[in-house]
Image (cartoon, helix red, strand yellow):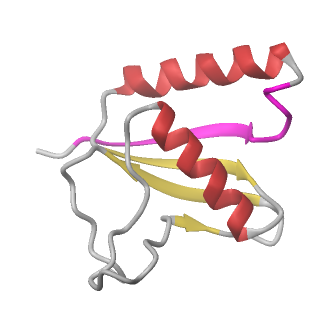
Amino acid sequence: MIRVGSYNLFDFGDGNAHRDPQVDVREQRLFDVIRCLDVDVLAVQEVKGSTPALAANRLRRLADAVNMDCQVRPSLVDEIAPVAVAAAPTGFNVALMWRPGITPIAGA
């Protein structure tokens, strides 16, 4: 059985954790909550990013922090692994993360 969850991150990435201790504390709490969800696949909302590349970088940072993956592995060695993020014109993006060992199918 695969456990699936959804979580609204509320402006994740909207701030500079290196200069604002409150942002750092908020992010650490967010990471702790996501780890406690104990899901295999997690859909997240509000990954802030004015460009798809910025949203992808923030999602990779989040996935690394909670020991999940967010990159669909390519079929060819020289391809760049795309990140599972759907960019929105508003900058409030949605994305997927999953536990290591789960293999998503690109384009499915």
Residue 104 % position (x, y): 27, 66
Q: Is residue 94 visible?
A: yes
| Extreme-front residue of the structure | 78
Quadrant containing the N terminus is top left
Quadrant containing the C terminus is bottom left
Residue 20 magenta-highlighted:
no
Q: In the picture provided, is 12 more to the left or to the right than 83?
A: right
- Which sits in the foreground, 74 or 59? 74
Q: Residue at x 24, y 41 (%)?
A: 3
Q: Residue at x 67, y 24 (%)?
A: 27
Q: In the picture provided, is 95 more to the left or to the right than 74?
A: right
Q: Residue at x 82, y 15 (%)?
A: 22
Residue 93 % position (x, y): 68, 59
- Which sits in the foreground, 30 or 74? 74
Q: In the picture provided, is 12 more to the left or to the right than 3?
A: right
Q: In the picture provided, is 38 more to the left or to the right than 20?
A: left
Extent of the magenta region: 3-18
Residue 15 magenta-highlighted:
yes
- Which sits in the foreground, 68 or 2? 68
**Where on the picture, by quarter, is residue 67?**
top left
| 84 shown above or below 79 | above
Q: Is residue 93 visible?
A: no
| 35 shown above or below 11 | above
How many marks can you see? 0
| Extreme-left residue of the structure | 1
Q: Residue at x 31, y 36 (%)?
A: 39
| 93 shown above or below 79 | above
Residue 65 % position (x, y): 50, 32
